Image (cartoon, rainbow, N blue to C red):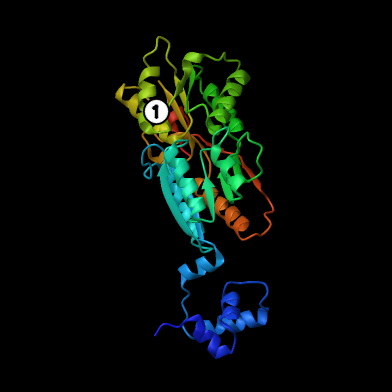
Amino acid sequence: MVVTIRDIAKKLELSIGAVSRALDGYPDISDETRQRVIQVAHEMGYVPNRAARQLRRKKADAVGYILPANTPRFADPFFSEFIAGLGDETALHPFDLVISIAPPGEEPEKHIYQSWVQGRKVDGFILTHLHLHDWRVQYLSQQGVPFAALENTLDGFDFARVEVNRQGGMVELVTHLVERGFRRIAYLGGAPELKIQADQFDGYRQGLEKAGIPYDFNLLATGDLTSSGGYFATKHMLSIPDPPNAIACINDETAFGVLHAAHELGLQIGRDLAVAGFDGVQASRYTEPPMTTLDIPVYDIARQLVKMLVTDIVGHPLPDRQVVLQPMLLIRESTGGNIS
């Protein structure tokens, strides 16, 4: 026989409303009464009707993440590690994790956000791959919907976020490449509207300037943050009259494509061509040769963002709305260094 709130109320001689509010944690119920209700509910084997509870509280008990991509990329090491962090952390609170995929900035993406917000499918969002001016940040801020993001925008909104010192990381990487004897250093980036592209390209330029190396527009290429994008961009860059002897990539997935193209051309990685990525995904350790990368704790960042978002959703004060991380340069054989 299914135990209901009515059964608990009858046993405790309380109103159904009082029992319901005690189980939902409302502050107008005393701690003593709440503990009595919780204890009896446990003894009677009461299992809450989650759908009814969500309806009463006008909460979904869910966090949303809409993967910004034109094609399914759940096998992308960055996204797989990031989603694992989201899932492990939401389960602790407990919240559901609702995931979808949509091309960034396109109407399908806008439709999903608007549908989830208006239908109260989730209580808040996790955002990644922000644009310099991001409509998602603008829309969610205007709607009063909580969200936490990896990186910031130029829109001037105050929101919970984790930022990475991408400029400083790229300066360190370029300096490392120069110290290894590489001076024709190319940068293989992403779409210009991406915040990570702007930050990392700025660091690349600063690194060249620090080393006294003139910026060469011919050593700049654009990909789509995928390995195939990195592959085709590399084939083009290595075909120009004075090709690069090092390629710094916007992310590890792009760098995987660079390695593939270089192997096909018979180049010795780390000597004929240095290759480096950004993100520090686990797969970078097992490429041939192991790949130098700027490591950020992708899994831990995802968990941190969920913690920040849930704190905001439940209405508790958030001590630090901005967390800044310094990437760690992992020097491996792909740039002529030792394995780390």
How many numbered circles does the render carry? 1
Measured as percent of width and height from the top left, residue 70 is found at: 39, 36
Measured as percent of width and height from the top left, residue 1 is found at: 39, 85
- Residue 257 figure quarter: top left
Q: Secondary structure at mark 1?
A: helix
Taking 270 as reference, is 47 above or below it? below
Residue positioned most to the top: 241
Residue found at x 50% / y 45%: 298
Q: Check disc 1 and give the amino acid type.
A: Gly
Q: Circle 1 is placed at which residue position?
A: 230
Front residue (pair 139, 66):
139
Measured as percent of width and height from the top left, residue 205 is found at: 58, 21
Residue found at x 46% / y 37%: 104
- Residue 210 figure quarter: top right
Is residue 338 visible in the rendered image? The answer is: no
Front residue (pair 86, 100):
100
Taking 286 as reference, is 36 above or below it? below
Taking 155 as reference, is 34 above or below it? below
Residue positioned most to the front: 118
Mark 1, Cα crowd under 10 Å, few <14 / some 14-19 / many 20+, is many
